[in-house]
Amino acid sequence: MATELKVQHVTENSFDIARQQLRAACEALNLPSGVYEILKEPARVYVVSIPVKMDSGEVKTFIGYRAQHTDVTGPTKGGIRFHPNVTLDEVKALSMWMTMKCNLVGLPYGGGKGGVVVNPKKLSQRELEQLSRGYIRAIVDAIGPDRDIPAPDVYTNAQVMGWMMDEYSKLAGCCSPGVITGKPLAVGGSLGRNEATARGCVFTVREAAAKLGLDLSQATAIIQGFGNAGSVAARLLNELGVTIVGVSDSQGAVYNPAGLDPYALAEHKAATGSVKGFAGGTDVDGDGLLEMPCDILVPAALENVITAGNAERIQARIVAEAANGPTTPEADEILFRRGVTVIPDILANAGGVTVSYFEWVQNRMHFYWTEEEVNQRLERMMVEAFCKTYEMSREKQVNMRLAAYMVSLDRIAKAMAARGWI
């Protein structure tokens, strides 16, 4: 009988969910109890206050976090988000998921994550720079190329990473590009990084379609979220012959069963700020778009958009999680029971951290690869991770999310044993 990822749904707290997922995978692998005990809390958590002199002359203090989940397989790695709703539990959960993601793909990292409680859209460029530099000053002793390597995340970008790398380098007394990834190309960024998350996701969709016997040239897709990952995924899927029939963003959604032109749609969004009103499609309800007919559904925006309330009505054969946490645990069980293949976030969107790893390697070597080399290396690692996850899911008769955790935890547990931790 097939085994599902059983979770006690007492709360939607992300850290509780992460720990429940961790426990389920440890139990499925019959790992020593010490593995869960070590991994159920981050190894280190930093809470800092960051004073910033605002343009008005007023000094305002912002709260920042950095969680380092485990360094058993290498230095910790993970993004920094600037968002008004950042919480310590969220950062801890994201650091745990980063551990799982890095070890699933085979990167020599543990998971890290950071955040600052702020609405960056309300800051001037100068205030944003001062906050970015202040955050690095506050955690400088906790990060480094061999200790913890941050990267961009929600509402941070290459420019913010450039400021942060510069601040760390000033404090270290030498130029240190390897301390941060996702930087501008001029200061050690990697070619291929901007498209990496979407490209990695599309590689996994291609592999899943092959396993299911789905002809991509005859397939249709809906993209929920038309930001960087969603828009690039739409274009790359279209290049594989997939017909994009629906797209949504925070302002609205458009649908056309005959197909949407992802290039024209991107131009429309750049000009108007939304996909809404696109002449090549019909405006529809954004939530309802998830339930429309398609072969491939790519949630590429928010958490918890596929829930127990709509999972029975999802018509896609493949759900590829370009976003973090778009499917609730309850919905996961429903989709698994219905035979829908979910490519979990720690696999589907691992392309971003994989190319961040490539950037770090290039920084350490002071030798840089072509975009073609980056994409070839990314494809090889994403395909290998997909195949291991798929094989585990079939061997153990579990869903793809639990299988992905099991592949990752097997590697982590072996590292713990080798180091004498368990």
Image (spheres, rainbow, N blue to C red):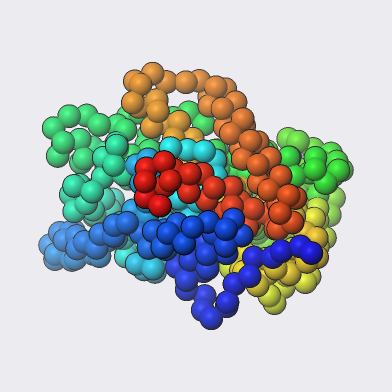
Position of residue 61 measured from the top left corner of the image (x, y, whole percent): 19, 65
Classify the position of the N terminus by image quarter. bottom right
**Which one is in front, 301 or 381?**
381
Can residue 77 be seen here? The reply is no
Position of residue 242 measured from the top left corner of the image (x, y, whole percent): 78, 42
> Which residue sits at x=16%, y=61%?
51
> Which residue sits at x=65%, y=46%?
389
Please determine whether, in this image, residue 200 is positioned above or below residue 221: above
**Which one is in front, 86 or 421?**
421
Across the whole image, how many numbered discs are drawn on residues? 0
**Which one is in front, 249 or 305?**
305
**Residue sitting at the far bottom:** 10
Q: Quadrant of residue 143?
A: top left
> Which residue sits at x=75%, y=50%?
394
192 to the left or right of 176: right
> Which residue sits at x=40%, y=52%?
422
Please determine whether, in this image, residue 321 is positioned above or below residue 146: below
Position of residue 317 measured from the top left corner of the image (x, y, whole percent): 80, 55
**Which one is in front, 337 or 63?**
337
328 to the left or right of 144: right
Please determine whether, in this image, residue 68 is positioned above or below residue 202: below
Can residue 141 be seen here? The reply is yes
Position of residue 344 measured from the top left corner of the image (x, y, whole percent): 62, 54
